[in-house]
Structure formats: C-alpha cells, structure tokens
Amino acid sequence: QSKVGDLLTCGVCHGPLEDPRLLRCQHSFCGDCLKMCVKHKEAYLLHYIACPLCQTLTELDEGQASVAQLPVDFKMVRLMDCVPRQVT
C-alpha cells in the first residue's frame, strides 16, 4: 500500500477513513471508531479519549456523544477527494 494510502487508513478499523476526526495529537480516526473507543471505557474516563496510536489524551465534553464535536480533519477529507478509492 502507498504512503498516501496509509494516511487515509484508520488505525483502529484498518479501513478507509470515514468521517475523519482529529485528536489533540493530530492523529485522525473514523468518527465511529472513536465512538467505539469511548463506549468501551470505564464511566470515570468518559471525559477523555486516549489516542489509539500515541496514547495522548484528548478531552471530551460528554463522552461518546461529544466525539461528533471533535474537529473534522479537513486535510484528510481533501486528500480523500484527490485519491481514487480502491475497489475491494
């Protein structure tokens, strides 16, 4: 797989990025993957999400629902628009 392809791959599901959301550490993951990460945490940790790659904490306002409040990674969105998706 190309380096650009690696950039457009989610580090959680290993599929193409869907609704890429940006964490404080600047790593991007699918919005739904981040929701799953938050969903499986202990209640007292719901106000933070640890980056699946580097473990840097990003503060969340209201747990799983606030993943949608994380910034969209528009650089990845633009890059996805420029690179044709591979048919599997």
Image (tube, grey):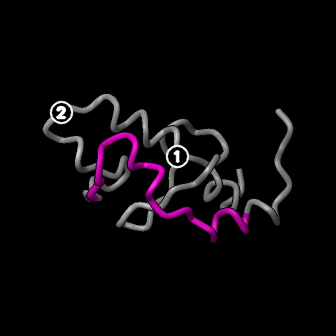
Query: Which SS class for mark 2?
Result: helix
Q: Residue at x 63, y 71 (%)?
A: 75
In the rendered image, which residue does mark 2 sit on?
A: 43
Q: Earlier in the sequence, mark 2 or mark 1?
A: 1
What amino acid is found at the position of numbered circle 2 in the picture? Ala
Percent position (x, y) of residue 78? 73, 68
Q: Residue at x 23, y 41 (%)?
A: 46
In the rendered image, which residue does mark 1 sit on?
A: 31
Identify which residue, 88 or 65, lies in the foreground.
65
Identify which residue, 45 or 88, lies in the foreground.
45
- Residues in magenta, as a range: 59-79
Q: Where is 72 relative to 53, above or below? A: below
**Quarter of the image where one finds residue 65:** top left
Identify which residue, 56 or 44, lies in the foreground.
44
Q: Residue at x 29, y 58 (%)?
A: 58
Instruction: Give the distance between the C-alpha atoms of the residues marked 2 and 1, in whole angstroms.
Output: 20 Å
Q: Residues within 10 Å of mark 1 (few under 14, many from 20)?
A: many
What amino acid is found at the position of numbered circle 1 in the picture? Gly
Whether the magenta-drawn stretch holds residue 78 is answered as yes
Query: Which SS class for mark 1?
Result: helix
Q: Residues within 10 Å of mark 2 (few under 14, many from 20)?
A: few
Q: Is residue 81 left or right of residue 32?
A: right
**Where the C terminus falls, by quadrant?**
top right
